[in-house]
Image (cartoon, helix red, strand yellow):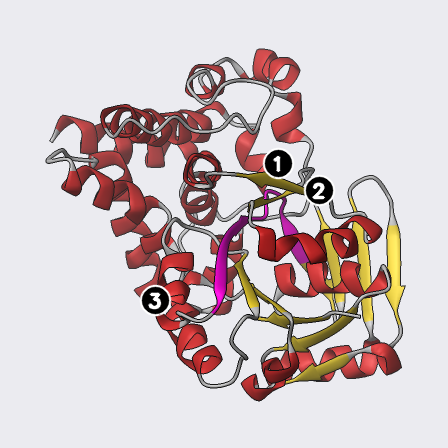
Amino acid sequence: MAKIVIYGAGSIGCYVGGRLLAGGSDVSFIGRARVADQLRHHGITLSRHDESRWHVRPERIEVSTDPATAASADLVLVTVKSTATATAAAELAGVIRPGTVVVSFQNGIGNAGVLRAALPQNTVLEGMVPFNVVERGPGAFHQGSAGELEIRRAPAMQPFVEAFSKAGLSLTQHADMLPVQWAKLLLNLNNAINALANRPLKEELSQRAYRICLGMAQKEALALLKLAHIRPTRLTPLPASWIPHVLGLPDALFERLGRRMLTIDPLARSSMSDDLTAGRPTEIDWINGEVVRLAQRLGQTATVNERLCELVREAERADVRPSWSGEALLAQMRAAVDT
């Protein structure tokens, strides 16, 4: 049986790894001491928005804080935050065998490239996790929204596809992941808005002012992608170019037309919001910052996304967590456009 190692036992890593383990795969986890202790004592309890449940007993879980655990891996799933990708690349380069397949299931656009540069003897693939996962307690992780895992198609990955299938985690494979990554990033532009709002995603997206902020950030990114000749993959019932217009609809109409966007666990927040709560650095430079860098490469500007980056960085430094109202945040976005 193939050995799968999860490098980054956070919410996404524990959920995906836990599902694979529950499906019968041989899985080990590498993560921080806090999570390792929780998994050893409580096991892994997984749930999904459709009421599905899984549990893996503590004695079945192999978890370590030592990256050397990856030495036996046939497949490594990298699920650390983008801020830790360079560290992950350096640690894996010292331990994994040539030929081990590595998948970046991370936010942003360039993480697989960082891993690939450090691991020239390995197949490194871009992956994408479209759903939201929240930690509900020690060893308990909940998938709060729908979606299937996406990955770049490669012969080296095919021996592992059945393991994902047995776990009920279908892999949608693509010849080119860049349009998929940008499609996900367009949706993830809401992470900053949700973090600044400091309220659950469902509550935030139910308010038109916040949605208009998201629509402005998306419109700016879509214009740049058009200049770069990148057409985002369709991940939602509506094409990416339509979503900003739907976001601007009155609340009652949006509730009907945008129902899928509101099919979220009532308590779920973005990972960026969770990072601010925990006092951790956020992934703002790998989400909205990607739009700013794309603009710079094209000789353009991205004032809305640049302002969101500034506000999140200010929140990271603040002694008291800000909670922006929709109207106040929208005024910031409009001012950014007018400058």
**Residue to which mark 1 is pinned:** 202
**Residue to which mark 3 is pinned:** 117
Amino acid beneath label 3:
Ala
Residue under the point 73% across and 60% down: 141
Q: Is residue 281 visible in this depiction of the protein?
A: no
Q: Quadrant of the C terminus?
A: top left
- Mark 2 or 3: in front is 3
Q: Residues within 10 Å of mark 2 (few under 14, many from 20)?
A: some
Left or right, residue 292 beside residue 193: left
Is 178 drawn above or below residue 320 in the view shown? above
Q: Are marks 1 and 2 in contact (CB under 8 Å)?
A: yes
Left or right, residue 155 beside residue 91: right
Amino acid beneath label 2:
Asp
Is 40 drawn above or below residue 263 in the view shown? below
Q: Distance from label 2 to label 3 (Cα)?
A: 38 Å
**Is residue 83 covered in magenta?**
no
Magenta range is 122-134
Left or right, residue 68 beside residue 287: right
Q: Distance from label 3 to label 1 (Cα)?
A: 39 Å
Q: Distance from label 1 to label 2 (Cα)?
A: 7 Å
Is 173 drawn above or below residue 112 in the view shown? above
